[in-house]
Image (cartoon, helix red, strand yellow):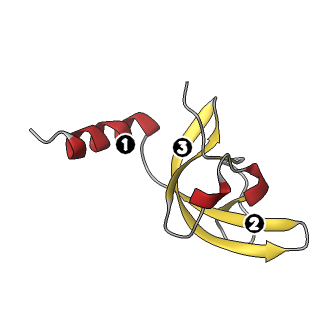
């Protein structure tokens, strides 16, 4: 099972054209900052995303996410290669 950094509806775009969610939905809000690469979605449909920006709104801080291509498992292989080069 994959643990997400921030829960998000991966089909939920706002007027910015990005996926949005609230910072309150982050497991650890301190890692959610522009440029961070995070796992977003939920345990049934996780995806790798880049945090685009944080926007203060009356309802809370909105986090905009840009989905990256591929599966979470693809990035795991990348990280393993980077940590343990052949």
Q: Are marks 2 and 3 in contact (CB under 8 Å)?
A: no
Disc 3 versus disc 1: distance between alpha carbons? Answer: 10 Å
Q: Residues within 10 Å of mark 3 (few under 14, many from 20)?
A: many
Viewer-proximal residue among 77 and 82: 82
Locate residue 59: give its quadrant. Answer: bottom right
- Element marked by disc 2: strand
Viewer-proximal residue among 50 and 79: 79
Residue at 72% across, 47% down: 9
**Residue occupied by mark 3:** 47
Disc 2 versus disc 3: distance between alpha carbons? Answer: 18 Å
Q: Earlier in the sequence, mark 1 or mark 2?
A: 2
Residue at 84% across, 74% down: 57
- Element marked by disc 3: strand
Disc 1 versus disc 2: distance between alpha carbons? Answer: 25 Å
Q: Residues within 10 Å of mark 1 (few under 14, many from 20)?
A: few
Residue at 61% across, 34% down: 45
Q: Residue 11: which disc?
A: none
Q: Residues within 10 Å of mark 2 (few under 14, many from 20)?
A: some
Spot occupied by residue 69 in the image (x, y as percentages of width and height) = 43, 50
- In the current view of this chain or complex, which residue is farthest to the right? 58
Quarter placement of the C terminus: top left
Q: Earlier in the sequence, mark 2 or mark 3?
A: 3
Q: Residue 62: which disc?
A: 2
- Element marked by disc 1: helix
Q: Left or right: where does residue 18 sit relative to residue 85?
A: right
Q: Are marks 3 and 1 in contact (CB under 8 Å)?
A: no
Q: Nearer the viewer, mark 2 or mark 3?
A: 2
Q: Residue 75: which disc?
A: 1
Spot occupied by residue 1 in the image (x, y as percentages of width and height) = 55, 24
């Amino acid at each position: 099972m994959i643990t997400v950094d921030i829960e998000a509806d991966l089909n939920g775009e706002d007027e910015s054209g990005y996926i949005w969610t609230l910072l309150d939905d982050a497991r650890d809000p301190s890692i959610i900052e522009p440029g961070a690469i995070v796992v977003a979605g939920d345990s049934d449909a996780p995806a790798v995303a880049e945090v685009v920006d944080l926007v203060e709104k009356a309802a809370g801080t909105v986090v905009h996410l840009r989905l990256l291509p591929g599966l979470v498992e693809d990035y795991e292989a990348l990280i393993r290669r980077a940590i343990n080069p052949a």
